Every structure is written in structure tokens, then in C-alpha cells.
């Protein structure tokens, strides 16, 4: 509600890829085909899907097939802002909530810079006594207790700041010819503007089974009704609704005994 990001967003169409019975290789190839020439020029793509759809293996396979590919995690940006807010609260003896005012959050965002450091893209944290590169502290400082226990509070109020920071970082990388892979929750991904959006889906096995059963019931009932039809009932437009209903329930009864 701070007006940092628009309340209403228009999300580009998502290309759904059915992964049922497909190898990671095949799925990755379908995504690459979907990207078209953007895959060789550099672009931002989002990947979503429920657990069990194989997002992790798909990402790993894409990275093998597209050499200029990198993955991006919004989590580290939330963690960096949490580190700064918690540090500000400690240094100024205020509550974490007070350290998360819109004005202070804006000042922490200015302490984060995205760019090339030591020849690769990274996020620099520079302020409140810190001079860190996120890639070097992702598994240490950013996973420490100061961040861990405070992240829910800070993440709740910094969605907009993080999305804006991420959006500009992604553009810098894509302009540099990289394919940037973003995976995560649909709610956050919806704020990232890109036409290259994919979702891995598993065809619902139950639905498929029910559809097949219905097709079989219909076909069997039709065959039997045709056999039983006399020239006389044909004059009156074939079997009645009642005949059809009782035949379908008989066929279903037979099928359940198989």
C-alpha cells in the first residue's frame, strides 16, 4: 500500500508445458523452442510449477543446454535488506518495526548495488559498516541468526522494494546477452515483466482416468444398444433416454466387476 509497486498488474500469457512422462531433456528443449531467438540474444524467463513437476532438474538441464544461463534468487535480496534493517535497529536501539519505515527501507535499497564485480554479476551491500558481495556471504552472514529470525517481518514489508531492485538487475543481465532464469512463487513472478513465462504442469492422472472410463462406457453402451435396436424402435428415433440411462449403469456395473 506504499505505492512502491502498482496495485494492478497485467501478466503476460504463461506457456504451460505438460511434463507427464517426459524427460528433463525433452522439457528443457520445449522451453528453448518456446524462447526462440531470445535464447541466443539474452532474456529473462520465469519458471513456475507445483512441487513434483521437476523444476530443479529442468533448470539444471537448461543451464547445460544454454551456456549463457544464470539463475536468480529473490531470496538473497530479501535477506540483504533484512540484514540492513536488523543492523539499523541494533545500532539505533529501535525496534525492527521502526527500522522498517518506508523512508528507511528506501535508504537500505540505496545501499544495494547490482553490477559486475570480479568479472561476474553480483550484488554489493555497502552501508551501515558493511562492504560485502552477496555471492561471498550468501551461505554465511545472510544465513545467520540476525537474518533468519527477522526475515518474516522484513519480507512482509519489502515486496515492492525487492521487485523494483530485481527488475532493474534482470534488465542489466539480459542486455548483456544472458538468459536469466527466475523460479519461484507465482505471486512474486507475476510482478516481473517478461513475455517468456513457463509453467510445468502434470496432467491430472485422475481426470485422465475418468475421461477414459467415460469414453469406454459410452462406446460399449452404444454398441449394445445398436445390437438391441429393432426396426420398430428405429421408427421412433432410437432408444429412449430411460433405455440409455439403464444401459449406461449396466455397463458401469460390468466395468466395476472387471
Image (cartoon, helix red, strand yellow):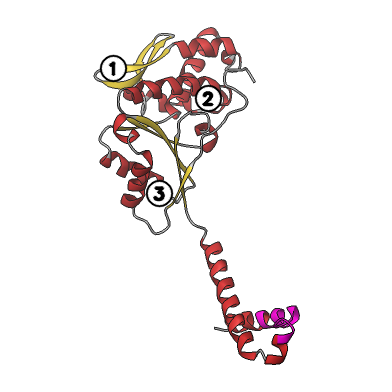
Q: Is residue 231 left or right of residue 48?
A: right
Residue at image position (61%, 81%) is 221
- Mark before the other along the chain sequence, 2 or 3: 3
| Image height of 232 relative to 109, above or below | below
| Image height of 206 relative to 13, above or below | below
Mark 3 → mark 1, Cα distance in angstroms: 32 Å
Q: Dot 2 surroundings within 10 Å: few (below 14), some, or many (20 or more)?
A: some
| Image height of 128 relative to 162, above or below | above
Q: Nearest the camera: 149 or 153?
A: 153
Residue assigned mark 1:
117
Membership of 98 in magenta stretch: no
Residue assigned mark 2:
150
The residue segment tinted magenta is: 235-248
Mark 1 → mark 2, Cα distance in angstroms: 28 Å
Numbered disc total:
3
Query: Which of the image's four quarters has the N terminus?
Result: top right
Amino acid at each position: 500500500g506504499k505505492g512502491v509497486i502498482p496495485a494492478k498488474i497485467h501478466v503476460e500469457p504463461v506457456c504451460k508445458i505438460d511434463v507427464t512422462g517426459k524427460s528433463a531433456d525433452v522439457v528443457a528443449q520445449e522451453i528453448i523452442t518456446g524462447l526462440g531467438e531470445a535464447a541466443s540474444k539474452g532474456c529473462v524467463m520465469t519458471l513456475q510449477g507445483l512441487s513434483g513437476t521437476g523444476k530443479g532438474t529442468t533448470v539444471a538441464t537448461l543451464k547445460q543446454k544454454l551456456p549463457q544461463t544464470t539463475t536468480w534468487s529473490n531470496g538473497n535480496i530479501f535477506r540483504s535488506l533484512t540484514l540492513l534493517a536488523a543492523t539499523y535497529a541494533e545500532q539505533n536501539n529501535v525496534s525492527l518495526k521502526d527500522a522498517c519505515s518506508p523512508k528507511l527501507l528506501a535508504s537500505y535499497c540505496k545501499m544495494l548495488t547490482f553490477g559486475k564485480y570480479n568479472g561476474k554479476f553480483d550484488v554489493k551491500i555497502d552501508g551501515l559498516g558493511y562492504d560485502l558481495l552477496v555471492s561471498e556471504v550468501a551461505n554465511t552472514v545472510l544465513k545467520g541468526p540476525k537474518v533468519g529470525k527477522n526475515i518474516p517481518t522484513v519480507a512482509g514489508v519489502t515486496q515492492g522494494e525487492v521487485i523494483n531492485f530485481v527488475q532493474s538487475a534482470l534488465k542489466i543481465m539480459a542486455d548483456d546477452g544472458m538468459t536469466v532464469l527466475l523460479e519461484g512463487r507465482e505471486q512474486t513472478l507475476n510482478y516481473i515483466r517478461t513475455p517468456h513465462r513457463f509453467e510445468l504442469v502434470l496432467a491430472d492422472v485422475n481426470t485422465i482416468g475418468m475421461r477414459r472410463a467415460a469414453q469406454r462406457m459410452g462406446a460399449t453402451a452404444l454398441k449394445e444398444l445398436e445390437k438391441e435396436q429393432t426396426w420398430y424402435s428405429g421408427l421412433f428415433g432410437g432408444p429412449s433416454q430411460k433405455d440409455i440411462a439403464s444401459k449406461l449403469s449396466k455397463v458401469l456395473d460390468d466395468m466395476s466387476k472387471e
